[in-house]
Image: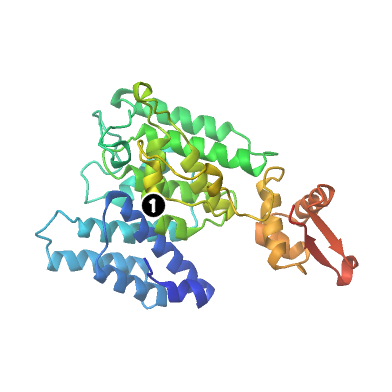
Amino acid sequence: MGNFEEYTQQSEPNKREKAEVWKTAIGLQQVDGLKPSGYLIATARQNIEGDITIEEVKQLIDSYYKQHPVKDTENRTEEADKVSARIAQILGEKTFSFSPAEYLSIHRRLFQDIYTHAGKIRDYNITKQEWVLNGETVLYASAESLKTTMEYDFRQEKQFSYRGLNSTKTIQHIADFVSGLWQIHPFGEGNTRTTAVFTIKYLRTFGFEVNNSLFEEHSWYFRNALVRANFNNLTKNIHATKEYLLRFFSNLLLGENHILKNREMLVNFQSAQNIADNAPKSNICTLNCTLEEHFVLEFLKTNPKATQKDIAINIKKSERTVKTITSSLQQKDLLERKNGKRNGFWLVKNN
């Protein structure tokens, strides 16, 4: 998209953080084929520069559409502008509660005054024709079971422990949870955008630095991957697969380089390439590392002289935990300390 690149590449941290949030907020509109206006882009730049607050952005957008009523509602530009500003506000906040109430609250905040059912669980059954399924639909949860099903999924996830899981199994479990939550589809409209915002906020509670460019550039891939993870048609030999969703999350959280192409998810797509061509290009083996260990290795690759305190600040853990992690990595022969404690440095071994 190219929006706000000058801020994300060279700017001061505060501006860069705001720009990344805006890139995600605008990129997520692609899941419903929406495109924000030039006015929204210009207003967002004022916010990034620090000239106006996010509340003032929302007020300006509201005033703009009161003065310039949209006659052509086909493009839903007003919705894209307002929801982008609201996503930017939510992602900029340092608050989160892992609960169905939070999930519903995000939907309400994103779509109030846009949908009459904002923040409400749908009371009707739905189908959606999907491009990636050649017009067929995923089977979504029935209206009668939505509340119970959603509460069950949240309860199971809250009780689940990620402790000791290597990065591969962690990513798989995250994909399972997000896929299941999306398939419940408690909202008539705006389900994917709400799920994406909730997911980003949830992942941050683990200390993840979410790769915002993935949601900016590949939000439609994210939605199609969720569709493929929840669609079966055994008469046509089509089986639900999380392969594409795992690629997305591996890129998002581990900085891997899986190729993300929507056409490969089409149910009748015949790939001429071996699936191995899309193997991750990460230099670090993640199969025998926890996510915390992976983050330490990635940090030390570019900061070999970092102290235990530096590492602790970066991964948001105690120095005692960092000492345990570095010891574990040394035992796995993935990390080595050179030249002693005082004047030494860390050597990451690319196994």
Q: Residue at x 30, y 56 (%)?
A: 83
Q: Residue furthest top?
A: 235
**Position of residue 308 measured from the top left corner of the image (x, y, whole percent):** 78, 62
**Position of residue 180 measured from the top left corner of the image (x, y, whole percent):** 44, 33
Foreground: 77 or 285?
285
Label 1 neighbourhood size at 10 Å, few (<14), some (14-19), many (20+)?
A: many
Vertical placement of residue 199 versus 210, above or below: above
Is residue 190 found left or right of 284 in the rendered image? left
Q: Residue furthest right?
A: 340
**Position of residue 2 measured from the top left corner of the image (x, y, whole percent):** 38, 69
Q: Quadrant of residue 312?
A: bottom right
Q: Residue furthest front?
A: 272
Q: Is any part of residue 82 visible from this angle?
A: yes
Q: Residue at x 52, y 51 (%)?
A: 258
Q: Quadrant of residue 66?
A: bottom left
Q: Which residue is mark 1?
A: 219
Is residue 313 found left or right of 34 in the rendered image? right
| Residue type indicated by callout 1 | Ser
**Position of residue 36 measured from the top left corner of the image (x, y, whole percent):** 27, 62
Q: Residue at x 43, y 68 (%)?
A: 19
Q: Residue furthest left?
A: 71
Q: Quadrant of residue 240?
A: top left
